[in-house]
Amino acid sequence: MPGRKARRNAPLNPTRAELPPEFAAQLRKIGDKVYCTWSAPDITAVLAQMPGKKSRKSTMRRSPSPTRVPADLKDECDQLRRIGDKVNLRQKLLNFISKLFNLIT
Amino acid sequence: MGDPLQDRTRRLLTDYILFCARAPNTPEPLPTSVEAALLRSVTSQIQQEHQDLFNSFRDYQGNRLELVTQMADELLSNDQEFNWGRLVMLLAFVGTLMNQDRTVKRRRDQRNRLLLERDCYLIVSLLYNRLTGRHRSWLEAHGGWDGFCQFFKNPLPPGFWRRLLIRAILSCFFATAIFYIWKCL
């Protein structure tokens, strides 16, 4: 490409260090990400770009259940929700019984 | 002066997450509030009771924040279905994720620690925003963290005693029902 060739052949200005455009774009992206992470009230938007996601493949292998898929996770969510409701009900019952005992005694 | 509910929520979440994510073989830090002490005991009891469910998430090294967000979406979807039991379950789950009992390769320890600290901050922010934003009205309607302490003031009895208690209640119920029917006839 002539433009790229011309840029490559252009004399270097010693007073100003030139950054490659990819590097600048990368820096901008990292800056945006850091800004979002530290300032946005809802951080869910930056989840997709989290570095942890990159290492997911390797970590999934290390994880105790390598076959974990979203459907599987959904089951676990349901299970947690059910147990949570049960804990809530049990505690309500317990509070009711203790209130009853307090009334009697 | 800041909002008391926000302050207490932030302090409680920070205390709990840092307690769960502390390095192995380090002494337990003292709880910073009554609700923090209660939350630790309730969640540890739940984690023990449902070990099978929680064990698969121990020493999880993937994207913890993504997982917690999904769980929070599912468990705390709206105010109508929100309750203390669900909140405690979510926090027990988060505590398990942050727990680093079995450390992985020593070479990666430092990196893991840094990632864990970053996740601690992000998860505290996520839960804090959810609780003081979407569920603030529910929390206020149920007495805030004083209401939480009030709700869990009677500790759940251990398995044997709980079964015994349920049997006793059921027996009383059936005895009353039989007595009532016998009287009516």
Image: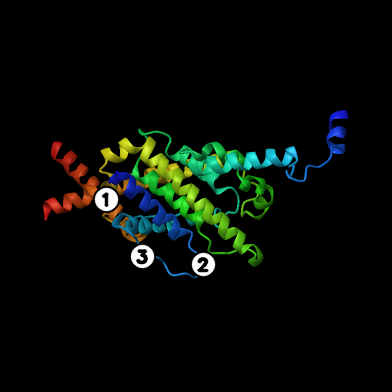
For label 1, count other residues whose C-alpha is less than 10 Å away and answer few (under 14), some (14-19) or many (20+).
many
User: Where residue A26 sits: x, y (%)?
Assistant: 68, 41
Callout 2: SS: loop
Amino acid type of the residue tagged 3 in the rendering: Leu
Is residue B46 visible to the viewer in this orientation of the structure?
Answer: no
Q: Are the residues tagged 3 and 1 within 8 Å (C-beta)? A: no
Q: Nearer the viewer, mark 1 or mark 2?
A: 2
User: Where residue B14 sits: x, y (%)?
Assistant: 41, 54
Q: For the point 19% across and 45% down, which residue is it?
A: B176
Q: Foreground residue, B6 or B94?
A: B6
Q: Chain of mark 2?
A: B
Q: Is B70 left, or right, of B164 in this rendering?
A: right
Q: Is B32 left, or right, of A10 in this rendering?
A: left
User: Where residue A55 sits: x, y (%)?
Assistant: 66, 49
Is residue B92 visible to the viewer in this orientation of the structure?
Answer: yes
Q: Which residue is mark 3?
A: B30
Q: Which residue is mark 2?
A: B24
Q: Quadrant of residue B35?
A: bottom left
Q: Which mark is residue A94?
A: 1
Amino acid type of the residue tagged 1 in the rendering: Leu
Callout 3: SS: loop
Mark 2–mark 3 Cα distance, whole angstroms, equals: 16 Å
Q: Is A100 left, or right, of B127 in this rendering?
A: left
Q: Quadrant of residue A10?
A: top right
